[in-house]
Image (cartoon, rainbow, N blue to C red):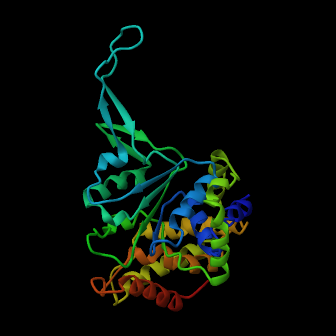
């Protein structure tokens, strides 16, 4: 089932099978994904393809400096005629859900809105719920945020705080396709948007079953120790100001189990952890070069150096 799901997404998201695998890993783990890349490389297309393939609802939120929290979560609207069909009085306020009430939410250029509005995403991403006017409303399940940000344009942006970055399971870049894949992309778009004709492969209950299956993937105690050793090494590194938190170690464990399932395995191997360590951990640490240019490259390099030093079980 997962193989068919991956192949279906790759029908229109061409030339990037590992990106699709990482996206599905995040989906199976019940977490969220941060895509940090330049415009036009297929970030929106990937989110749309995932939503279409799982027969889920899709909403896109374009983050701008004037966006308000209620534009995301929704708000209560006053009704002039607060009477029912039989003349009985009814609640004069009606809650209109915002675009956050969807299975797949694309938060486009999330760093272009104010911290106040960004904070509206925290409860939704962390607790899978929204509190508005004193009432807590659950979000539809499954729920996944795919956020994007441009790594090149920083003027007029509001960098994501560490607490918000920590809500994302992974931070990855798509990159440019190779020449052959790009030629296929050009040919594919001659007849319109290919995502409109993409079929659905599984339904939402089946996806929730796969999530349960991912949770039950076996991980040996020696691999749990390996994860803790990597986390400890980031905390003890002279190049690191803030190391990986316990939540980061839990995230790497969850990601490894979901990643193993995408290969059809019901157990985790060391290579799963080594593959995922950079995308899962690099945005959770703060290096001493944090306030300089290329801080992402520095944090990813540090995680790679730690992987080379920590003994593999």
Q: Quadrant of residue 90?
A: top left
Q: Residue at x 56, y 57 (%)?
A: 48
Percent position (x, y) of residue 39?
45, 72
Q: Nearer the viewer, residue 24 or 38?
A: 38
Residue 118 visible, this angle: yes
Q: Nearer the viewer, residue 82 or 144?
A: 82
Q: Nearer the viewer, residue 146 or 125?
A: 146
Horizontally, residue 106 falls left or right of residue 119, namely: right
Residue 212 visible, this angle: no
Task: Give the total number of marks visible in the rendering.
Answer: 0
User: Which quadrant is the C terminus positioned in?
Assistant: bottom right
Q: Residue at x 51, y 51 (%)?
A: 143
Give the farthest residue toward the front: 190
Horizontally, residue 13 falls left or right of residue 137, namely: right
Q: Quadrant of residue 265?
A: bottom right
Percent position (x, y) of residue 28?
59, 59
Q: Residue at x 58, y 48 (%)?
A: 56
Relative to residue 138, is residue 31 depicted above or below? below
User: Which quadrant is the N terminus positioned in?
Assistant: bottom right
Percent position (x, y) of residue 111?
33, 66
Q: Residue at x 62, y 60 (%)?
A: 192
Percent position (x, y) of residue 6?
68, 64
């Amino acid at each position: 089932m997962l193989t068919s799901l991956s192949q279906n997404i790759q029908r229109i998201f061409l030339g990037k099978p590992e990106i699709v695998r990482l996206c599905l890993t995040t989906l199976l783990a019940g977490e969220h994904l941060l895509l940090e890349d330049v415009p036009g490389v297929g970030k929106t297309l990937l989110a749309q393809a995932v939503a279409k393939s799982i027969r889920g609802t899709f909403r896109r939120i374009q983050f701008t400096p004037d966006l308000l929290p209620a534009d995301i979560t929704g708000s209560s609207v006053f009704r002039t005629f607060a009477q029912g069909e039989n003349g009985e009085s009814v609640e004069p306020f009606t809650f209109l859900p915002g675009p956050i009430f969807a299975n797949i939410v694309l938060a486009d250029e999330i760093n272009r809105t104010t911290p106040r509005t960004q904070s509206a995403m925290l409860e939704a991403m962390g607790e899978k719920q929204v509190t508005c006017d004193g009432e807590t409303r659950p979000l539809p399940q499954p729920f996944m945020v795919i956020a994007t940000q441009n790594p090149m344009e920083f003027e007029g942006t509001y960098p994501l705080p560490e607490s918000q970055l920590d809500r994302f399971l992974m931070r990855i870049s798509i990159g440019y396709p190779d020449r052959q894949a790009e030629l296929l992309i050009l040919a594919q778009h001659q007849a319109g948007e290919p995502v409109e004709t993409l079929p659905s492969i599984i339904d939402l209950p089946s996806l929730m079953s796969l999530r349960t299956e991912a949770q039950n993937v076996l991980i040996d105690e020696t691999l749990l120790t390996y994860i803790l050793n990597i986390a400890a090494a980031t905390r003890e590194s002279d190049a690191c100001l803030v190391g990986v938190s316990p939540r980061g170690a839990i995230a790497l464990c969850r990601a490894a189990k979901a990643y193993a399932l995408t290969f059809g395995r019901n157990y985790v191997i060391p290579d799963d952890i080594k593959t995922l360590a950079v995308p899962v951990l690099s945005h959770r640490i703060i290096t001493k070069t944090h306030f300089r240019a290329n801080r992402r490259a520095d944090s990813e390099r540090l995680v790679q150096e730690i992987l080379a030093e920590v003994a593999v079980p």
